[in-house]
Amino acid sequence: MLPFQTKNPSPSVGSKKLKLLSLEQRLEVIKELENGKSERPLAKQFGVSRAQINRISKDREKIKAISKAKSFKPTTKKFITSKYPELEKSLYAWVQAMRKPKHRMKPLPLSKKIIQERARREAELRSITDFCASDGWFRNWANRFNIGPSVRLFGEAGDVDIAEVEPKMEELRSELRRYQPKNIFYADESGLFYRALPTRSYLGNEENRKLIRGSKGLRAKDCLTIMLCVNATGTCKIDPLIIGSSKNPHCFRDSPCPIPYMNQSSSWMDRYIYKRWWTEIFLPAIRKWTDEPVAILMDNFSGHDPECIDPLEQVKVFFYPPNVTSVYQPLDQGIINALKTSYKSEMVKRLVSAYDNLDTLREQSRKAKKGRKGLKFGDSATVLNAGQLIKTCWDSLTAKSIVGCWIHSKTLPHLPDEIGEFEHDVSNSKTVQSQTLKELQEMLKALSLSNQDNLQHLGLHEAVEITTDASAAETFSRWFNLENETDILASEEFIVSEEIREEFDASIYDSQDQVQNSEEPMEMENVIAPSEILSHEKLLCEKLFKYSSAAIDAKFVDPVLLELLQKVKTHLSQSYCCIN
């Protein structure tokens, strides 16, 4: 506790409540004192005791230092210092890096749980065993570092400084004036938990994932990435691309996917997948659409390779300013949300339609080959089911709805009448989800709660129970927006990082065992040579290169970690010719 901090005494009956001055007021007192004003009139002016003014006078240098360090808000009255200042400073630096990342990475929406998990990791790195990232600690830390409630974001709207971004948007609009609205496209990708069903809870960081891996709850979070692209008039919708982790899903052996499918180890968009989409899907579609000049808008995600250009110079790429997704980008104004809401609704409808005939379908399901069951048997959706439903939902989006989202985004310089007829039916995500919820509630209420076995097989037992709860709207809303849950995103990153760390630690122990158990002594001429390294070190470097590559391909959102891993990978590939 700082010398000038005064604790509130337990007031007796009739005693006055002690008044403490804020940091800002204390600085004013110090200024008045330095200008020659005496303590007594200052005490009267600020309504405090002379003793408090005297303490401020004695501690003036410490108060100035605190103000200069900007560790507390100007309105702070109690200066509670931290037991672990270095840990908290490191955590604050990490938060700043996440909110303003380098290398065109998207900012990470930070929730309290994500910050608390990072704080625990910082404590672990410093071998601090008695640290508990409690809610009380979080409040004090946020107060010390002037972290406001806006740190908890479920989108990026809180990051957008309209006054700062608008001039850049005006420059973009001036460029787009040269194009007709029908020839202006926008492309963006989004994750989709294509098997997830309404439930009261999802797995948290504190659960033992090794025990539950493979369970239906965890499989329900299997994710695909959807790449969407559409023009401003809604008259040209490019076939959606879905990205999964499997190279050849079993379900495709019975029937081809109705929309393009590509694979990546983490089911995410990277530059290789983007280049394939650009050359194999987008450019051929544009050639069929028009021979006029075309503009395509994208966000500044690092996976969107700026080196991908049209060799015929028909198409020109324009990038949005950073972090304007929730304000200006048309797909984020309701198109993506409407597609996902429609997808999840259709998936539930398919399962509900299997309810009455489920016994027969389950018998047929037992005879079906691995990976080829899916919704038609009342089982979890396959990638093929996802492709079919995505195509159906994408085709059902009307041109008027798409135009409404473009107009709502305020990206185009054209007047609404120049773009086309529009409706704002999907630009309001709450309205869309509310209407869908009513339809699903009516449908689910019709199912019998008595046949719990069938409901559990379909994965709808909790959904049916939830429809009668007062919290149904909140639960279904979370399901509709599951892909944007910051705590779920943190859990996914936590799982990947833990698995990589565990396997890397194991590789170190294996390498050490190989050295310790080696019976043949190493020859001196082989210990150090310009072109080779020790056998155990070579093995370790190969493991490190492997897991660095895997981590880079994974959906890590920490730009600092990504930069470090990239440097490690580059160093190993350049230093040791044995690394491929």
Image (spheres, helix red, strand yellow):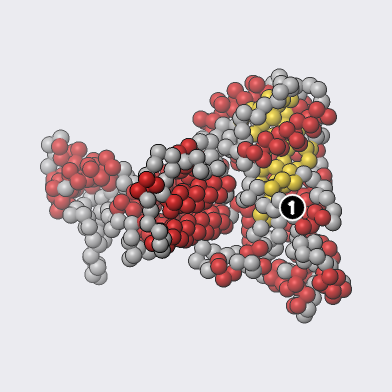
Give the image location of residue 323, x and y in percent: 55, 38
Is 24 displayed left or right of 274 in the figure?
left
Is 412 displayed left or right of 384 in the figure?
left
Give the image location of residue 168, x and y in percent: 56, 26
Residue on which the image places disc 1: 248
- In this view, 156 is above or below 289: below
* Quarter of the rendering occupied by the N terminus: bottom left
- In this view, 337 is above or below 408: below
Residue at image x 67%, y 26%?
A: 309
* Quarter of the rendering occupied by the C terminus: top right
Q: Which SS class for mark 1?
A: loop
Give the image location of residue 241, x and y in percent: 73, 43
Q: Amino acid at mark 1?
A: Asn
Residue at image x 84%, y 70%?
A: 367
Between residues 36 and 161, which one lies in front from this camera angle? 161
- In this view, 416 is above or below 432: above
**Mark 1, residues whose alpha carbon is within 10 Å: few (<14), some, or many (≥20)?**
few
Residue at image x 81%, y 34%?
A: 235
Residue 258, visible in the rendered structure: yes
Between residues 369 and 27, which one lies in front from this camera angle? 369
Between residues 137 and 518, which one lies in front from this camera angle? 518
Residue 440, visible in the rendered structure: no
| Residue most extreme to the bottom | 450
Give the image location of residue 400, x and y in percent: 80, 38
Residue at image x 34%, y 65%?
A: 129
